[in-house]
Image (tube, coloured by chain):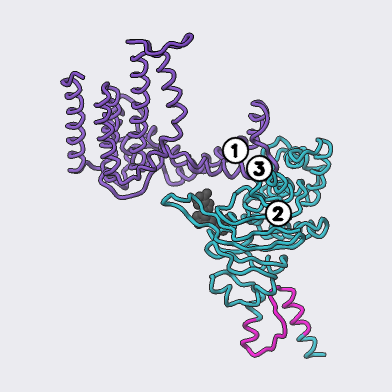
Chain colours: A cyan, B purple
Amino acid sequence: MSIVAEKLTHIYLEGSPNESVAIDSIDLKIEAGEFWGIIGHTGSGKSTLVQHLNALMQPTSGRICVDGDDLKDKKNRREARKKVGLVFQYPEYQLFEETVLKDIAYGPMNMGESTEKAYEIAREAMVSVGLSPDEIEGRSPFELSGGQKRRVAIAGIIAIRPRYLVLDEPMAGLDPRGRKDILNLLKTLREKTGCAVIMISHSMDDIAQFADHVAVLNEGKLYKAGSVAEVFSDMEALRRTGLDIPQAAILAERLKKQGIEIDRSIYTVEQMLDFITEKTGGVSG
Amino acid sequence: MKDITLGQYYNVDSIIHALDPRTKLVLTFAYLILVFLVSKLWAFGLVALFAISIIYLSKVPFKMVLKALKPMRFLLVLMFLLNLFAAKSGEVLLKWWIFEITAGGIRQAVFIVIRLLLLVAGTTLMTFTTTPISLTDGLEKLLAPLKKIGFPSHELAMMMTIALRFIPTLLEEADKIMKAQLSRGADLESGNIIKRAKSMIPILVPLFVSAFRRADELAMAMESRCYHGGEGRTKMRVIAFKKRDAIAFLIFASAFALILVLQKLVVF
Ligand SMILES: Nc1ncnc2c1ncn2[C@@H]1O[C@H](COP(=O)(O)OP(=O)(O)O)[C@@H](O)[C@H]1O
Ligand SMILES: [Mg+2]
């Protein structure tokens, strides 16, 4: 089971003078259960790419298959929306119901669940985004704080119980605390349900720490894709695109320049901590 | 949604683009009157020829103008049929049950279609060649004399500018919200009218919320930059009549006069 993109290309306003090639022959395979980070500059085509994953957009050329079903076929699109849950950027702007509970239940009800069952799923989803149903389910989504709204909106997609959860910059505009909360919630959700997470983010450090695979987009092309270790092993390539490099990797690079021998790749703070304790432990003991 | 071309600016350099917006507004208005005054088939041909030359001068591809006319096709067919059967004058050519097609009916039906096409082509060309901002600027200037009798010409122009500025933003927003709800399994296409109207609620509520939020933010931003109405306000880009505007007036006036005089003189 996987999402497969083959030579996926999308051209906006094709044939007009303003036409722009947003994504260009992208080949990508995302297996069920993986945690992908998608990075790239603004305008590199990240949002366009993820909107193809649940058939909101159709490729200009190329193919996209979810669990083997080609999304060119209209019959497969509804199924794809159920399997691939897409959380848009600033998803809190899509809230519309009178109460938080009804809003989160909107998705499962559309997918054919009974009201009772949908409410039950909605409450579960609330818990998994760290909101207490007793406190919040009866309130209007419009009177919540920004961070709470964001979580309600994410719960609205989690409630569809997607096999692949796709998030477009889910941490944009949140404070550091809110960012951490969202990241941890995604990690826990994945451990609990086994769903794949595909997250667009501008934070290399977050991706290095939480993702196991990375796709780097540059000017609409897939610049690099693979396991975190593979992609972060070639810092120079990342640097050429002008993207940030994880802090820990920069430190590791400087230490190497100082003549300190590092026998492994380091790109997360934890790896660096392990390495330093090992090293210093080794010296003093 | 993306096919809406009415009111869109087509960015190229041309003589028509360079004209003063007031010139274009007045001449478009004159052109609209001309289209209603013309009542002979060959005279329509002359008007069309004139319009085509202006489109050529504007460097806007004919394809774009045709695309702007496309959404009218149902209206055109409807108007054609209505006039064909409703107008009864002259020789009866065909009769079937209660329907009657007369020579006068055919004439009127053809004329209404041509008129509508010419009208929309003309106004579309104006919006293709004039940015919304300079259009409202021109309108404000044209209406300025009415200020003396208390007509809020500045406020009207400002409202139009803001509305025009936000149409693309709101369309984009509507598109995004629609996609977001589709992601949540919204079904916007099937079911009867009531069900379909109901399925618009998840799109309309966020759209209105966002429109009000934007209006609020804009008002705040305008006030923090000390906006206080049109009194004593100067323009960054001062619009001014140039020689080319005088020439445009001359050309239009002579062409229109020629067409009308010919129509009067020639008997067929
Ligand atoms: N609706 C649209 N119409 C035309 N061009 C668009 C549209 N949306 C995005 N683009 C263009 O496509 C490119 C990729 O955009 P996007 O996928 O939003 O990038 P990212 O999410 O990485 O910032 C950009 O150059 C952008 O200008
Ligand atoms: Mg984006």
The CA span between labels 1 and 3 is 19 Å
Residue B209 is tagged as 1
Image coordinates of residue A261 in percent, x first then y, are 69, 88
Nearer-the-camera pick, A201 or B48: B48
Q: Secondary structure at mark 2?
A: strand
Res. A54 in view: yes
Q: Which residue is mark 3?
A: B182
From the viewer's perspective, is residue B46 above or below residue A15?
above
Crowd rating for badge 2 (residues with CA inside 10 Å; few <14, some 14–19, many 20+): many
User: Which picture quadrant has residue A107?
Assistant: top right
Q: Secondary structure at mark 3?
A: helix
Q: Are marks 3 and 2 in contact (CB under 8 Å)?
A: no
State the residue at coordinates (66%, 33%). Answer: B190
The residue segment tinted magenta is A253-278
Q: Which residue is mark 2?
A: A66
State the residue at coordinates (68%, 66%). Answer: A207
For badge 1, the amino acid type reads: Val
Image coordinates of residue A257 in percent, x first then y, are 61, 87
For badge 2, the amino acid type reads: Val
From the viewer's perspective, is residue A216 above or below residue B216?
below
